Amino acid sequence: MLDSNWLAVGLLRNIPPQGSRVVRTEHGEIAVFRNSADEVFALLNRCPHRGGPLAEGIVHGRLVSCPLHAWQVQLDSGEAKAPDIGCVPRFPVKVVGGEVYLGLPAPTTSRARLNTVD
């Protein structure tokens, strides 16, 4: 049984492998990533360097490269890869029966959906 802090955001099949989708929440835009191993991660959609939209970056392994200045950010920790320094908030995420759930710090009453980044 899922507790109230888990927000259903859409189906895993709607996130392309090595791609992402953006979920707009009361905590800001959260990028939900799927890598080639079908692992799913969620980070605030802002690079720790200059705030670039990470959801528009390239996913490779457990990293995403920011589209603005190619900083690489660890998907599982939010930490910038050395020699760069910085961190972006990450959020818990899980997949149950093909549905992606995003863990948010406070209960929410609305149901968000995955949106395509333009």
Image (cartoon, rainbow, N blue to C red):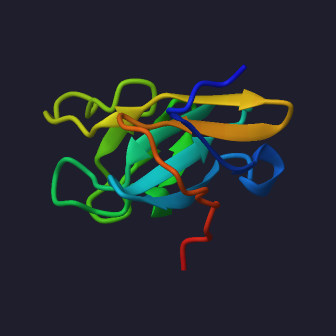
- The residue drawn where x is 21% and y is 35% is 87
Percent coordinates x, y for residue 92 in the rendering: 48, 28
Q: Note whether 80 is above or below 22 in the view shown.
A: above
- The residue drawn where x is 86% and y is 31% is 97
Front one among 47 and 83: 47
Which quadrant is home to the N terminus? top right
Percent coordinates x, y for residue 103 in the rendering: 49, 33
Q: How many marks?
A: 0
Specify the quadrant of the image occupied by residue 66: bottom left
Residue at the top extreme, as displayed:
1
- The residue drawn where x is 30% and y is 65% is 68
Whether residue 114 sits left or right of residue 91 in the image: it is right
Q: Note whether 104 is above or below 1 in the view shown.
A: below
Q: Note whether 58 is above or below 33 in the view shown.
A: below
Residue at the bottom extreme, as displayed:
118
Q: Is residue 90 visible?
A: yes
Front one among 68 and 20: 20
Which quadrant is home to the C terminus? bottom right
- The residue drawn where x is 52% and y is 58% is 23
Q: Note whether 46 is above or below 78 in the view shown.
A: below
Residue at the front extreme, as displayed:
109
Q: Is residue 37 visible?
A: no
Percent coordinates x, y for residue 46 in the rendering: 29, 55
Front one among 37 and 26: 26
Whether residue 64 sits left or right of residue 99 in the image: it is left
Whether residue 25 sits left or right of residue 35 in the image: it is left
Percent coordinates x, y for residue 67 in the rendering: 38, 63
